[in-house]
Amino acid sequence: MDHTTSLTQHIHASPEKVWSVISDIPGSAATLSGVDSVQLLSEGPYGEGTRWKETRTMMGRSETVEMWVAQADPPRTTTVKALQGGADYTSRFSLAERNGGTDLTLTFGAEVVRPTAFSRITMALFGKIGMAVTRKALARDLAEIAAKAESL
């Protein structure tokens, strides 16, 4: 059972500046209002294998998720993964230069791993609501990334 959403934000900054914001994992709690804290689990620059724990508050609930970079091709694209509560989450950021700035597209997907009858019913009932809340949070993240990149 797969749920995916995609949003694009035009940012008045170069792909390199946008990349510097999305790859700044330690600074993401200062950039993104939805992120409460970040704990790095690996050392070195942003790239495949970079791992961290991110704490967010959504729908009034604080939750910490371990995340990692599954793919990075600076400054064009990166894919971040997380496994939490029986779901496999994928966030893919794609950067494309356009009109003197950058189109940043964020595609987010959630797939239930080994779905049970209960999880299928739950996703059928609440999946659309959950994705609507997630889409709103992702739109806010994109706007905040844009604001940060445009201020550099």
Image (cartoon, rainbow, N blue to C red):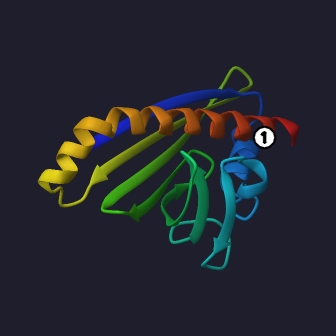
Q: In this view, does 104 lie to the left or right of 87?
A: right
Q: Is residue 73 left or right of residue 125?
A: right
Q: Mark 1 points at which residue?
A: 149
- Quadrant (top left/top right/bottom left/bottom right) for the N terminus: top left
Say which element carries label 1. Answer: helix
Q: Which residue is rendered at x = 78% and y = 40% of the image?
A: 149
Q: Which residue is rendered at x = 80% and y = 41% of the image?
A: 148
Q: Which residue is rendered at x = 63% and y = 48% of the image?
A: 75
Above or below: residue 73 compared with residue 49: above
Name the image quarter holding residue 47. Answer: bottom right
Q: Nearer the viewer, residue 62 or 101?
A: 62
Q: Is residue 27 left or right of residue 118?
A: right
Which percent across, then down, holds residue 121? 18, 43
Res. 64 visible in picture: yes
* Residue density around tag 1, few if under 14, some if 14–19, many if 20 or more, within 10 Å: many
Q: Nearer the viewer, residue 67 or 50?
A: 67
Name the image quarter holding residue 143. Answer: top right
- Quadrant (top left/top right/bottom left/bottom right) for the C terminus: top right
